Each structure stands twice: as C-alpha cells, then as structure tokens.
Amino acid sequence: MADFYELKVSNLYKETKDTVVVEFDVPEQQHETFKFQQGQHLTLRKLINGEDIRRTYSLCTSPIENLWKVAIKQIPGGVFSTYANTELSIGDELDVMAPAGNFFVEVDPDAANNYIAFAAGSGITPMLSIIKTHLLSEPNCTFKLFYLNRTVKSIIFKEEIERLKNQFFERFQVFHFLTKEQRDIPFLNGRFDKEKLAVLTKTFIDIEDTAHCFLCGPQEMIFLIRDELEAAGLASDRIHYELFFSGENEASKLHIAEVLEHKVDGTDVTIIDAGKEFHFVM
C-alpha cells in the first residue's frame, strides 16, 4: 500500500479566478522520496466533512527547479477542488503520496529533438513541467505548444509561458486558440478540428522531424488529434497522452473501457482511478 506523507503548504496563490496553485514544503530528508520526472503527478488526501477525499494533480514544475507545485482548477461539485480554492491556506498540511506517472520521455541532452504539445484548459499543468524540462536540459531541442482555452483570462500559466517564450525565443513557440473570444487571426478562433489540424500538419508541424508529441485535454480532442497526426504520418509510438477518470461509478468505468477500446498500440494512456479532478469546460 502506497504511503502518504504529511506536507505543509508553503505557498498558495490564484493563477486564474477558478485555479489555485499550491506549493509544498518538502523537507530535505524527503527529497529523495519526492524526486520526480517531468509530467508526473501527486495524489493528495484530506479529510473533508468527515470523508476521506483523495485527488491526483499533475506537477507543474520541472525536476530541475527542485519545487513541488500543483494547479487545482475548481470544478462545480468538486469536493477537493472547491476546498483547495476556497479554504486551503498557507501553513495548512495535506497528506501527499510520492510522485508517480509515466507521462514523459527520457531527456537526451545531446539530441536535437523537435517536440510538439497540444493542451486544453488545465491540461497545461503536466505540459509546463515537460516543456520546461526539455528546454532546460536539451539545448538543441525545440518545442511548439498549441494551447486551447475559453478566454485570455482563463489561460492558466499565461505569464509563465510568456516568460519561457522570452527565455527560449528561438526554440519555443506558442499558439493560443480561444473558443469564447475572437482573435485577430480567424484560424486561432475555436476548437481543434480536422480542418485546423490539416493546416497545422502542413504548415506548422514538420511531421517527419517531430520526435514526440504530448496531448492532454478532453478525450474527444485527444483522439481527434492523435488520429489526424497518425494520418499525416506521425508514428503512434511518438504520441503520448494522459486521461484521468474517477472510476467511482458505472458511467466512469464504462468511459474507461471506451478509452481502452480506442487505445492504439504504441501510444501511452494513463488512467488514474484514485479520483483526479481533471475537468474541461470549453
């Protein structure tokens, strides 16, 4: 049985009106236990109204930073996410499991890899960890991020992404797509669809020169992008994605079965049934 460790909240701030970033103080003697790979997650536990609530959230920091932060987006009816956004304070303690997860590829400092990533909403959290790690550790790599949100104000980690663009301006490109606000460029309005992806794979993405692609967002978006990238010639073993479901009821279990049924050999799917609050309203 996995162990929980009591960690103190060392910092906490609102990233957007419905997303809070929580940083944990990991004592030096537990640094080895909490050593993590980019893209991994933490499982948090708290007794709320007499109920043992456990939720899993992706780390948004790079292992290089030696920081442990998660972003928690409040969802309607979400017990833990509501608690984190409305009650949790600096100095409070939460039970936390050691980092886990397989949503990453090994870093190769000598390689000149070109990476792409598609994220929607809070799907940016593991992406930020992955992007920072590769840019910092692979001096010859490039990264392109295609990021979907409702409005500019709803963009999680907008300022940090801009700082990364400035720091790695020759190696990191970001394309923001919005569904509830109009951009000056019509192509950047609305969700990803077959037509947009056809343009992206022909003009923005060099399929043959893409080392790996990371996807994190709603199931429909992930499967659409995966299928279109494969149709354009990207090998399935270069496409990595992560899906989270609670597994707490029959509908969720059927959803998991559907995901597994559509899984293509060679692609990564991580399903966490400890109850991750990972929700998108686009």
Image (spheres, grey):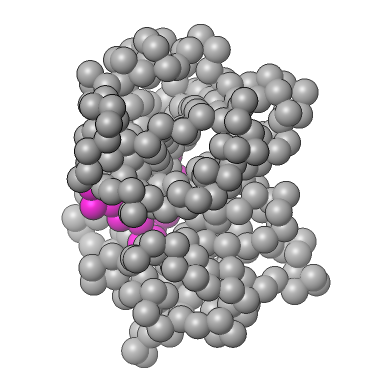
- Is residue 191 something that shows in the picture? no
Residue lying furthest bottom: 50
Residue 243 colored in magenta in the image: no
| In the image, residue 279 lies in the stretch drawn in magenta | yes
Where residue 190 appears, as percent x and y from the top left, is: 22, 35
Which residue is situated farthest in the front direction here? 184
Which residue: 56% across, 81% down? 90
Residue 57 position in % (x across, y down): 47, 60
Residue nearer the viewer, 266 or 197: 197
Horizontal relation, residue 110 to residue 147: left or right:
right
Which residue is painted at 33% across and 48% down in the image? Answer: 152
Tell me the quarter of the picture where residue 99 sits.
bottom right
Camera-nearest residue between 232 and 32: 232
Residue at the spot x=77%, y=23% of the render? 110
Magenta-tinted stretch: 269-282
Up the image or down, 178 lies above or below 64; here it is above
Quadrant of the image for the N terminus? bottom right
62 sits to left or right of 270: right
Residue 229 sits above or below residue 225 on the image: above
In the displayed orientation, state which residue is furthest to the right: 29
In this rendering, does residue 201 appear at all? yes
65 shown above or below 248? above
- Name the foreground residue: 52 vs 279: 279
Would you say 163 lies left or right of 269 here?
Answer: right
Determine whether 268 is above or below 127 in the image: above
Percent of width and height locating residue 137: 73, 36
State left or right for residue 188 relative to residue 115.
left
In the image, residue 78 lies at what x, y percent?
29, 70
Magenta residues, dominant SS class: loop
